[in-house]
């Protein structure tokens, strides 16, 4: 095979007698040449390469931004009391010893993190601190408030688990009523579930868009080099030999776009730090910024490179099949 040259005058490695004797070395040599030549070709047209990579990077950054937003909404839900205490109001005839016995029974449950007993006097003191209640309470002869068990569910307990806990508390002997913000918790869980599914669908759609962008770029590149490809095919070059530089071009497109996507996600995370910190102060420091895990930031460029390879593989195979 005669030596061919691309637009940057890079010689295509030829199969000599020595390379035929070492097929693995020849295969490795052509892979190295293809990777370097495709990168030089992309860098030789910086504006076109930047526009393609930027479009792909911004598209891939959108699911990361939504994922980060959902993580912070989850953190906000925890700060607002997603696992807030369930209040069990006991009947007025319950004595202190029986209340402690009930509290011990509830503490032994696996789905309960802690149980606090609020006495009638503590409840009266809390009401007295509220504006407008102090004078009215002094007029009462007896304390009408019951004992209250403040039951804290285990962190991470889902809405169904909390509902089972509330049902069991209501069925306990000596319990008058149970107060729980279960409907609010269920709505929050439902919204987070919808958000997670939306992020998944959006990620799939934008991954498909990235494949199509790379495929179209490779199609234009192959069309512009049709004569060179025809010469290579005429002198006996295999489809894999001709296709390999375009596959590496797709990998470079995907890798660079993945790096841009990770950078944009980190910029969004940095932009959220200040407002979330101020919001955290309003909730006594219980709210913290949820950051993207390091493995996800590493996986995005790798996954984008795979998407770029896939788009280049599909389009180059189709284009070369037409040329044959």
Image (cartoon, rainbow, N blue to C red):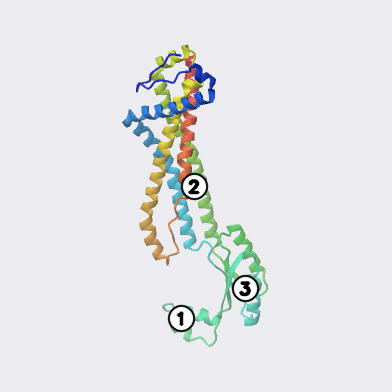
**Place of residue 103 in the rendered image (x, y in percent of width and height, measured from the top left):** 63, 74
Q: Quadrant of residue 109?
A: bottom right
Choose mark 3 or mark 2, whichever is in front: 2
Q: Nearer the viewer, residue 295 or 127?
A: 295
Residue closest to the far bottom = 141
SS for tag 2? helix
The residue identified by callout 3 is 176
311 above or below 268?
above
Q: CA distance from mark 1 to mark 2?
A: 53 Å
Residue closest to the far left = 47
Q: Nearer the viewer, residue 116 or 142?
A: 116
The residue identified by callout 2 is 295
The residue identified by callout 1 is 128
Dot 1 alpha-carbon crowd within 10 angstroms: few under 14, some 14 to 19, many 20 or more: some
Q: Which badge, 1 or 2, comes first in the chain's sequence?
A: 1
At x 52%, y 61%, the residue is: 82
Q: Is residue 12 visible?
A: yes
SS for tag 1? helix
**Place of residue 170 in the rendered image (x, y in percent of width and height, measured from the top left):** 64, 68
101 above or below 77?
below
Choose mark 1 or mark 2, whichever is in front: 2
**Place of residue 78 in the rendered image (x, y in percent of width and height, measured from the top left):** 49, 60
Q: Which badge, 3 or 1, comes first in the chain's sequence?
A: 1
Dot 3 alpha-carbon crowd within 10 angstroms: few under 14, some 14 to 19, many 20 or more: some
Q: Nearer the viewer, residue 248 or 30?
A: 30
At x 60%, y 62%, the residue is: 162
Q: Is residue 95 visible?
A: no
Q: CA distance from mark 3 to mark 2?
A: 50 Å
Q: Which badge, 3 or 2, comes first in the chain's sequence?
A: 3
- Residues at discs 1 and 2 in contact (Cβ within 8 Å): no
């Amino acid at each position: 095979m005669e030596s061919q040259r691309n637009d940057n005058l890079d010689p295509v490695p030829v199969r000599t007698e020595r390379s035929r004797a070492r097929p693995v070395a020849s295969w490795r040599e052509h892979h190295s040449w293809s990777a370097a030549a495709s990168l030089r070709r992309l860098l030789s047209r910086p504006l076109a390469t930047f526009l393609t990579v930027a479009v792909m990077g911004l598209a891939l950054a959108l699911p990361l931004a939504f994922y980060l937003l959902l993580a912070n909404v989850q953190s906000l839900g925890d700060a607002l009391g997603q696992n807030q205490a369930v209040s069990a109001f006991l009947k007025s005839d319950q004595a202190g010893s029986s209340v402690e016995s009930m509290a011990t029974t509830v503490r032994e449950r696996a789905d309960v993190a802690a149980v606090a007993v609020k006495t009638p006097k503590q409840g009266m003191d809390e009401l007295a601190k509220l504006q407008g209640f102090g004078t009215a309470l002094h007029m009462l002869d007896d304390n009408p408030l019951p004992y209250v068990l403040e039951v804290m569910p285990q962190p991470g307990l889902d809405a169904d688990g909390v509902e089972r806990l509330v049902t069991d508390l209501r069925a306990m002997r000596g319990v008058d009523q149970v107060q729980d913000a279960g409907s609010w918790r269920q709505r929050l869980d439902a919204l987070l579930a919808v958000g997670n599914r939306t992020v998944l669908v959006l990620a799939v759609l934008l991954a498909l868009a990235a494949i199509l962008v790379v495929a179209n770029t490779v199609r234009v590149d192959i069309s512009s080099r049709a004569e060179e490809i025809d010469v290579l095919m005429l002198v006996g070059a295999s489809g894999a030999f001709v296709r390999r530089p375009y596959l590496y071009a797709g990998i470079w497109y995907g890798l660079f776009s993945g790096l841009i996507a990770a950078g944009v996600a980190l910029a969004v995370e940095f932009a959220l730090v200040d407002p979330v910190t101020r919001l955290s102060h309003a909730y006594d420091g219980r709210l913290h910024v949820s950051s993207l895990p390091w493995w996800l930031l590493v996986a995005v460029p790798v996954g984008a490179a795979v998407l770029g390879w896939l788009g280049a593989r599909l389009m180059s195979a189709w284009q070369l099949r037409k040329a044959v």
